[in-house]
Image: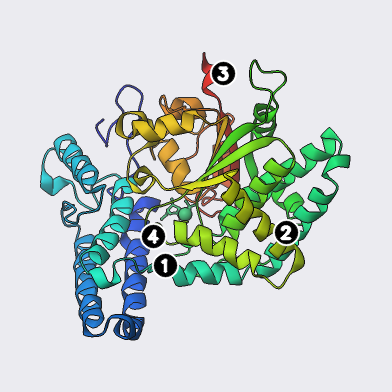
Amino acid sequence: MAADQTVHGVPPSLSAKVVGSFAYLTVRDRLPTILTKVIDTIHRNKHKFFEEYGEEGIEAEKQTISLLSKLRNELQTDKPILAVTDGLQDTESWNQYLQRHQRLQGDEASVSWFKSPWLYVECYMYRRIQEALWHNPPISDYDYFNEGKTQGFFESQQAVMTLCTYLENINKSMAELSKNQLLEHFNKLLQVSLWGNKCDLSISAGQDNSQKLSPIDSLSSLQPFILVDGSNMVWSTLQRPGQPGKTTAGRVDVVLDNAGFELVTDLVFADFLVSSGLVREVHFHGKSFPWFVSDVTAKDFQWTIRQTMAANHKWMSKSGVQWQSYLKEGVWSYHDHPFWTQPHEFCDMAADAPDLYATLQGADLVLFKGDLNYRKLTGDREWDHTVSFGTALRGFGPAPLCALRTLKANVQVGLQQGQGEKLTSQESDWMTSGKYAVIQFYSPKSEQ
Ligand SMILES: O=P(O)(O)OC[C@@]1(O)O[C@H](CO)[C@@H](O)[C@@H]1O
Ligand SMILES: [Mn+2]
């Protein structure tokens, strides 16, 4: 697919080649800032590497920083995108993707940071950071974003306690709840998970943006900022009125986004789905290495549950213990397929990661958290706002799905006629401020 023109009705990819665009400002300003913070973090932890690995640790720190400084220079001087040179399992896939773009864009020189699709170069930066660590074994498994993710969790403690208390009050009266009361709690916790996505360290280039306000009390004031609300279709997808051979509750897959408070909101929602009997099992999908500053890795997932268990707060620790046992029983499971840390638009998944596509086809509902997932669902292209979500998905539809996203990039589809123009006239940055959100549902069945 040519990246910079409308072909067969598919518009161009967002790109930094458009001077002044959000993609341009991200590649010019925010990505170098994030990269510099990674370099500073590694340099600041030099003593830890020495304590743990002696001189080898010091040498590894030095070599890593030199590789990352070279990467930053490539980025800032718009050099050609280079092949990945490490031995990770997805190296071949990344280099095939590069060759695909080199064929599309004509030659190697034109596949550069400011001339290629924004989605590609932003994902590529995070993969090159991992490559630098991979080349320096003593510190290869160091998580250079860990400090920001753990700080985000600790700074949100008040909100976490409020949320776990709210969950406990629901769970202890679950048997007496009417269907309407259940629906009310469902909608509230779905929206808490939606707004948890505001806590994203990539958009803030690492600046703290933990949850300070009560996640429940602030819902009504946030309601007007939900631009598309498909909650009712999410709810009805989970009802199983005598579906042939499917009397038991279903399976929900959650494609996670950020660690910290957002992850807690996802765990609380998943707890409610199981404890209410709506859902039999939940599969969580995270990232296999540090990604977009605050995205969840396996270590973050386990750490967050352990921290919640160990909290000096009755309902937090009760929740953490429950979550640990869900994992042990297999009611919950955690997966981290390499595809989630590759640059592909999701319409490529069936071809490029058929095993993952088949896994998602086993779900009754797939929730996609956050902005990057939304960009990949819609291909990060310059769609008109009134194009339907189904059109933008371009055939991606392993199961009924719902995007829970606060808007932090200038791609948004499925709006009413005039809705985008009205928002632009009121607030020019409505697509990138993180103030607005969508609960956007799509079912492949509805298209048959
Ligand atoms: O997926 P998330 O965590 O909600 O957001 C990811 C993000 O911060 O990174 C990109 C900007 O650099 C945008 O996709 C978005 O702003
Ligand atoms: Mn993220």
Identify the secondary structure beneath mark 2. helix
Distance, label 1 to label 3, CA atoms, is: 41 Å
Distance, label 4 to label 1, CA atoms, is: 7 Å
Q: Across the whole image, how many numbered discs are drawn on residues?
A: 4
Label 3: which residue? 446
Label 1 vs 3, first from the N-terminus: 1
Residue at image point 43% right, 42% down: 375
Label 1: which residue? 145
Residue at image point 69% right, 23% down: 247
Residue 311, given in percent of the width and then of the height, sits at: 67, 70
* Disc nearest the viewer among 1 and 3: 1
* Identity, as a three-letter code, of the amino acid under mark 3: Ser
Are discs 4 and 1 less than 8 Å apart at CB?
Answer: yes
Label 3 vs 4, first from the N-terminus: 4
Tag shown at residue 164: 2
Disc 4 C-beta below 8 A from ligand 2: no
Distance, label 1 to label 2, CA atoms, is: 26 Å
Label 4: which residue? 290
* Identity, as a three-letter code, of the amino acid under mark 4: Pro
Q: Is residue 70 left or right of residue 184?
A: left
* Disc nearest the viewer among 3 and 4: 4
Label 1 vs 2, first from the N-terminus: 1
Identify the secondary structure beneath mark 1. loop
